[in-house]
Amino acid sequence: MIIATISFYVFAAMTIASAFMVISARNPVHSVLYLILAFFNSAALFVLLGAEFLAMILIVVYVGAVAVLFLFVVMMLDINFAELRQGFLQYLPIGGLVGIILLIELILVVSGWVLSPDAIMVGKQAAPVVEGVTNTEQLGQVIYTQYAYLFQIAGMILLVAMIGAIVLTHRQRPGVKKQVIATQVYRTREESMEVRKVEPGQGV
């Protein structure tokens, strides 16, 4: 029990520290590496909670795909980060005001949080052990029954975010030919093919 508690505090502290370094690191590559570290520590916290499937998904999907994709995109894009930081001081007062408002709201929420006696008693009771049902099956039953619509909405939000990221990073470059699918579809046979009669002995 003591080892589990110490491990929880160590992994939680590492997660908070790496998350802070993600937003405070000057090098974007370092930010992505700190993000991967935060994912690994979060996966360790899931393992301590007994959710091995969520830990595996966090490692395989987020570390193996999303974070690596972020790393390649940051390294491949020719972005002048010094130019992006030029307007930092201009928006600092607005950002500080928004941060202070959020901090006040969090303090009000935490100070007004009260647990009812019934909730305390329920929290002290041990969770029932379901025989013959794996952790993955229990998670699937909850997601695809009680939270099916919310799961679909989350997928739509991720789709919109992906499309928005593509639109924001898409750049117009002069002299580059682009494929126009509508022009190709509506092209007639006369426009795309020309029949010529070649006399004997006049071919190439």
Image (spheres, rainbow, N blue to C red):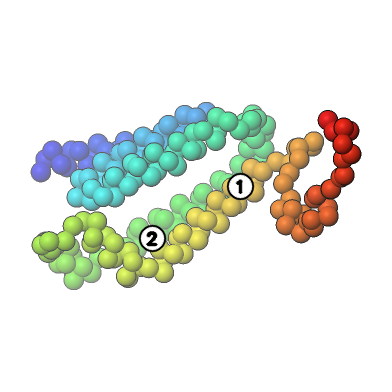
* Residue for point 52% across, 56% down: 159
Q: Is residue 42 left or right of residue 128?
A: right
Q: Nearer the viewer, residue 165 or 96?
A: 165
Q: Nearer the viewer, residue 189 or 32?
A: 189
In percent of width and height, residue 132 lies at: 12, 61
Q: Nearer the viewer, residue 184 or 63?
A: 184
* Residue for point 38% across, 39% down: 63
Res. 115 image quadrant: bottom left
Q: Is residue 68 visible?
A: yes
Report crowding for label 1: few under 14, some 14 to 19, many 20 or more residues within 10 A (C-alpha): few
Quadrant including the N terminus = top left
Which residue was labeled with disc 2? 109
Report crowding for label 2: few under 14, some 14 to 19, many 20 or more residues within 10 A (C-alpha): few
CA–CA distance in space, label 2 to label 1: 37 Å
Q: Is residue 186 left or right of residue 18?
A: right
82 up-or-down from 61: above or below: above
The mark lying in front, picked from 2 and 1, is 1
Mark 2 lies on a secondary structure that is helix
94 up-or-down from 131: above or below: above
Mark 1 lies on a secondary structure that is helix
Circle 1: residue type: Ile
89 up-or-down from 146: above or below: above
In percent of width and height, residue 181 lies at: 71, 53
In percent of width and height, residue 137 lies at: 23, 60
Res. 183 image quadrant: bottom right
Q: Is residue 15 visible?
A: no
Which residue was labeled with disc 1? 166
The total of numbered circles placed on residues is 2
In percent of width and height, residue 195 lies at: 84, 48
Q: Mark 2 vs mark 1: which is more N-terminal?
A: 2
* Residue for point 34% across, 59% down: 111
Circle 2: residue type: Val
